[in-house]
Image (cartoon, grey):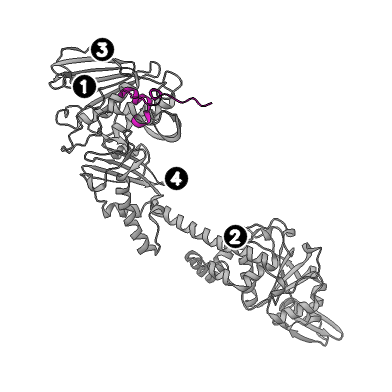
Amino acid sequence: MTKFKTIEQRFRKLDEISHVLLRPGRYVGSVTPHTAETWTYDVEANKMVKRELTWSPALLKIFDEVISNSVDFSKTEEGKHLDTIKVTMSQTSAEISIWDNGGISVVKHKEYDQYIPEMIFELRSGSNFDDTEDSLATGQNGEGAALTAIFSEEFTVKTADGKNSFVQTRTENSRTISEAVVKPSAKKFTEVLFIPDFVRLGMEDDTFSDDNYARLVKRVADVAGCNPHLHIYLNGKRIKINNFSDYVKLYVDDFIHEENEHWKVAITNSEEGFSHVSFVNGTETITGGNHIWYISEQIVGKLREYFKKKHKVDVKPADIRNHFLLFIDAAIVRPRYSSQTKEDLITEAKAFGTSIEISDKFIQKVIKSPIVQSVLDWIEAKEHAAEAAKLRALNKDSDKANLRKITKFTDASEKIDRRNCMLMVCEGDSAANSILSARTSMIGCYPLKGKPINAMGATTKELTDNKEFTELLAITGLKIGQKVKSPDDMRFGKFVIVADSDADGRHITGLIVALIRKFWPEMFTLGMVYRFQTPLMKVQVGKDVLYFDSLPEFDSWVKKNPKKKFTSRYLKGLGTSTAADFKKYFSEMDKNLIQLTAPEKADFDVVDMVFGKDVGSSDRRKVWLDIE
């Protein structure tokens, strides 16, 4: 039986600290450990490296709230003397110290009767509520470091403004606040020391893990990279970065860079899809935002024009952007984010208060960089993939083809031993008629009409529209994109080229070899490709018939038999051989069937050169013809 809750159990009113602790995602991001491949800063090597980490996003945020306060103060008129920030972290004690040489005014607010160093570390307080100022600070909601205090076991503020010093400690997630200790002092500094509440931040132990520590170290390096006017120290050692370009060098060696007073932009080629390392007023925008699109759209727009004009291709913006690794450090007036975590900038470009126009000089450098070549390679690969898909579609058609409807094809009558069956692809109908009149049950025949298509130089459409090509697929069982593993996979175990011995016949043989080389080169290795050699001369000596494969061979016989009477006939083409001739040829199959063995790479290179259509093949072919 369901027990209903009382009104008091159903409805609650929380104080601000309780609400923050109960709903941390609203304020400091996820307290669930996050695992991802991310950039980390190798202090010893002074390089950014990518590796997989598991960290608490909330821990990173409460750290960032404090260090960002120091950076923001350095950009004000009151804090322009602030030029040094020192971060000290210990994985053993779990205490974090962030020190700067700024100093908070140690005076009481007349309206609230609180010392400023106490007031500004409470929720809904601070100096960021005057929206009439063109502020370049990252703070916006008056929550900031107050959240750090709430998610800390202990949080201490020490500061001095040149006249007085102030010390105060908050414990129990900022519920307990000590009496402020105020003394005269000539120093100027602020130091915030805190011990994170690891349990509330989603960590099992009460000390830093190596991965969490690595994320905080990376953030310190980010601050140094985005604020070259500051001297940033980590555990006593300065992270020296003179400008944003130096910061980008921590990631990559080659990049294109452009900047003005408020915007710093760099780009390099990405092999892992679009990614960015971006900052707004020094705060890392991990998710991204409108500043990313503001820059990328400028670059993409000009590159699209280039591809249309130079390469006659319209590339979608996303397909160009996928080759970018962007680095951006933007100074934006009163930035607004999708949440307190400040990972996603939502300020519209028209409200940035600053701007940059990507120059033609920058674009020309991009055009000459690996970025554009990478896009061109992708376009070529995509086109090849599309062509391959169209060709593979022929496989389905060939499977459905009715061989009886291929009018010029005659199948071998042998049904069982197909491995030893041979398909004779011959030159012309007359040759086919002679072959068919003399063939055995192991021979099938398919006559070509003239010269076959040059598969090495044909377009996909030309191949798919070519009747002889599609019929050969159906006849043989060959599949585009599928290797032949064994002669048993095919309808014929032997593919035999039967062509005249003249120049045209050799050209036809070369074209068929090129076709097999392009799609099924393994057929040569498997010993499936043959050329059928027919005699060049036929001699009648009485009742005896002699055949000669070459004119020198015939001339030699004549010299050795000067007194013999004979008649001779030059077998100019296959059509001049009779059915009786072909019966003789087939009876000497071992002699006339020449296997085209697996070519060496150099042999395939010659095929590519002779039948290829690219510019390189054409140039090499001209040289080869001159030499030959």
What distance separates the C-alpha of mark 4 from that of mark 2?
36 Å
Name the residue beneath numbered marker 3.
178
Name the residue beneath numbered marker 1.
119
Q: Residue at x 65, y 66 (%)?
A: 398
The image quarter in which residue 291 lies:
top left
Element carrying mark 3: loop
Residue type highlighted by circle 1? Met
Placement of 371 over or under 196, stated as above or below = below
Inspect this view and state whether residue 237 appears.
no
Q: Residue at x 62, y 63 (%)?
A: 517
Q: Is residue 66 left or right of residue 287?
A: left
What distance separates the C-alpha of mark 2 from that of mark 3?
85 Å
Crowding around mark 2 (Cα neighbors within 10 Å: few <14, some 14 to 19, many 20+) is few
Residue 149 located within the stretch drawn in magenta: no
What distance separates the C-alpha of mark 4 from that of mark 3?
52 Å
Mark 4 or mark 2, earlier in chain: 4
Name the residue beneath numbered marker 4.
272
- Choose between 227 and 400: the one closer to the eye: 400
Element carrying mark 1: helix
Placement of 619 over or under 56, stated as above or below = below
Percent position of residue 608, x then y: 56, 64
Name the residue beneath numbered marker 2.
602
The image quarter in which residue 488 lies:
bottom right
Percent position of residue 51, x then y: 45, 34
**Nearer the observer, disc 2 or disc 3?**
3
Residue type highlighted by circle 3? Ser
**Nearer the observer, disc 1 or disc 2?**
1
Element carrying mark 2: helix
Mark 1 or mark 4, earlier in chain: 1
What distance separates the C-alpha of mark 1 from that of mark 2?
82 Å
